Image (spheres, rainbow, N blue to C red):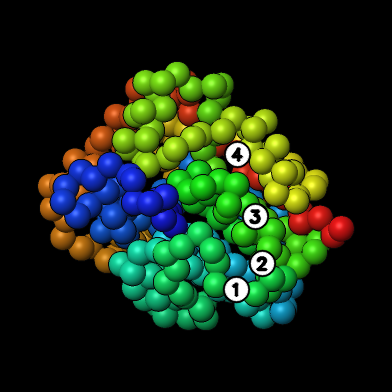
Amino acid sequence: MAYRVVSGIATKWGDDMDYHDALADLCVGSAHPGGYLATLAWLATIDFQPGMRVLEVGCGTGRTACEMASHPGVLVTAVDARQAMLDKARKRAQDSGVEVVFRLVDDERLPFDAGTFDLVVAESVTVFNDVQAMLLEYARVLVPGGFAVDTEMCAAAALPDDVMEAFYKTYGALRVPTQTQWKRLWREAGFDPVRVLLSGPVTVDSVRGDIPDLWSMAQKPDHDQEVWRIIEQNQTVMSEYAKWLQYAVIRATRQTG
């Protein structure tokens, strides 16, 4: 699920399409590392209560947002930078019988007042942007003592230049922090404690073994060859650089002071 790529720098595979556009075209609901299995795992740790205000940044086609909105009384707002994603997310919510407020947002500055939300969720979003700016925004829109859950790609170690270049060309990522670096960045943004709920390798097989998104499969849109070429390139990168790829689900609490 993609929010935006800093300054539109992601390499374009065609005149109008990049990796995130391809995901939108395919109605992909859980393209993030760990897939929907990881989503269900961290969702099970959250005590959703009526009146809880949740923001999902980079909601994509709305799979996670709709799941959270299925909890009685939970108020979910979800934003994304791609109208195509939001159109599909709204249809998913309608088909699922849940209420989610969807908004188009194409800037790192979130259009919400300070202290608006109790929980901020991001899945494979922060790494594609100015990481520090995004984490500060999460802190700003959270109430003191509120928390964030973020599923992000991690580097197993400092990445060689050729690996970083491949990630940049494929995903538009300017940097891929290690798990230790992610924790430090969250703390620097005003979060404590910061802990890892779940982590593991990122491989093609782990994505293929994920829980199918039956709603997405039911859409059956037509796809051109460019879409499939982009997806195949993604799989090639994941296979070739598997030893460098990990993911972590981070839970970070906004400090009250």
Residue 170, percent across and down? 32, 37
| Left or right side of 126 for 44 | right
Q: Would you say the residues marked 1 and 4 are in contact, meaning their CB atoms lie under 8 Å apart?
A: no
Is 177 situated above or below 106? above
Q: Which residue is mark 2?
A: 141
Q: CA distance from mark 3 to mark 2?
A: 9 Å
Q: Which mark is residue 136?
A: 3
Q: Residue at x 48, y 22 (%)?
A: 159
Q: Would you say the residues marked 2 and 1 are in contact, meaning their CB atoms lie under 8 Å apart?
A: yes
Is label 4 or label 3 in front? 3
Residue 66, percent across and down? 51, 69
Q: Residue at x 34, y 73 (%)?
A: 87
Q: In the rendered picture of this protein, how many numbered marks are placed on residues?
A: 4
Q: Residue at x 56, y 33 (%)?
A: 177
The C terminus lies in which quarter of the figure?
bottom right
Q: Residue at x 56, y 21 (%)?
A: 157
Give the amino acid type for the residue marked by disc 4 in the picture.
Answer: Ala
Q: CA distance from mark 1 to mark 4?
A: 27 Å
